[in-house]
Amino acid sequence: MNEIPPVPVALQPGATGPGDAWLLPRLQMQFRAVSDPIGAPVAKLGGQPVWLQEPTWPLSRPLNAPMMFVGQFPVPGDPPRLAYLFVSDDDNGLAESFDPEAGENALLVQPGGRIPPFVEVTATATGPCLWRRGATWNDKVPVELAVDFTPLDSLAETVLDAEIARQEAERGGGTPHPPDSDEAPGGPLPPYSYLGGKVHLWQPSLDVEASWRFLFQLDGGEGHEPDDPYTLNFGGGSGYAFLSEDRREGRFFWDCV
């Protein structure tokens, strides 16, 4: 089996729920176009999965069709693993991929992972992959992007932590404090695609079982602007990946404003 390169984050033993920072530090995802297919067990979006065991391609439960491969992400800890994200690609926008257990998305772990009971799989190794829009709205151009993990700059970290603190206060029934002058963003929004740290949600509730731990979040996108690297219909919001405490089973959902 190919060796999975380590990611410079550490498991936090004091994390007790999905809202805690289970992995630190928080690392921003930066996407980089590649000229050749990525065949190594590294973080990437699009292309085809680099399986570490026998292929287990998930099927959309209502459509009985292969889901779209979104990407693969390292699972820190020992032994190192990969988490493979799949989402139903529904042209009509009816797939309930926002629901973590509707059978319209899957976060599968290899090696030694468990396939969730609501996910059906086939032994096919390749299938539909992440895409962006081409010359017209309906053109689907497959993409493959390397994912680099980098620290956030200090201002982005401050703004993001302030937003998360306000969300936590709202979930706890308190009154979110207004942003201080040094918290207010004076430029671009902080990155919302990252691994580790605390989760940043668009809705105040975090409806995830207490046994799950936050792994990463990924911004959606329309995929038609020149600087849009991919198309992912998250309603203009973000998708969220969580793992079981033993790092062998995954859950994914998305929410938006």
Image: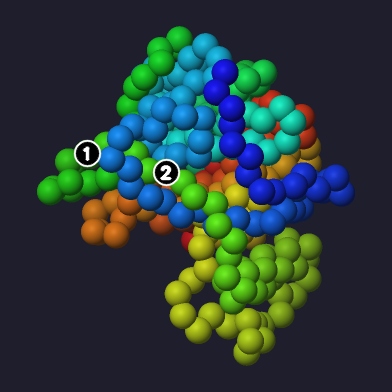
Q: Is residue 94 above or below residue 195?
A: above
Residue 141 visible in image: yes
**Dividing the image into 4 quarters, which one contains the N terminus?**
top right
Classify mark 1: helix, strand or loop. strand
Q: Nearer the viewer, mark 2 or mark 1?
A: 2
Residue at 50% in and 21% down = 51
| Residue at the image position 54 percent from the left and 38 percent from the top | 73
Question: SS for tag 2?
Answer: strand
Left or right, 248 with respect to 173, comes to: left
Question: How far is disc 2 from disc 1 in space, using C-alphas?
Answer: 19 Å
Name the amino acid type tagged 2: Ala
Nearest the eye: 89 or 227 = 227
The residue lying toward the viewer, choosing from 209 and 244, is 244
- Determine whether label 2 and label 1 are within 8 Å by CB: no
* Viewer-nearest residue: 116 or 170: 116
The residue carrying pointer 2 sits among few (fewer than 14), some (14 to 19) or many (20 or more) residues within 10 Å by Cα, namely: some
Which residue was labeled with disc 1? 140
Q: Residue at x 77, y 34 (%)?
A: 245
Instruction: Kindly identify which numbered label has been placed on residue 146.
Output: 2
Mark linked to residue 105: none
Q: Which amino acid, by three-letter code, is at mark 1?
A: Lys
User: Which is nearer the eye, 161 or 62?
Assistant: 161
> How dense is the environment of label 1, judged by Cα within 10 Å: few (below 14), some, or many (20 and up)?
some
Image coordinates of residue 104 in percent, x first then y, are 47, 30
Residue 218 position (above or below residue 91): below
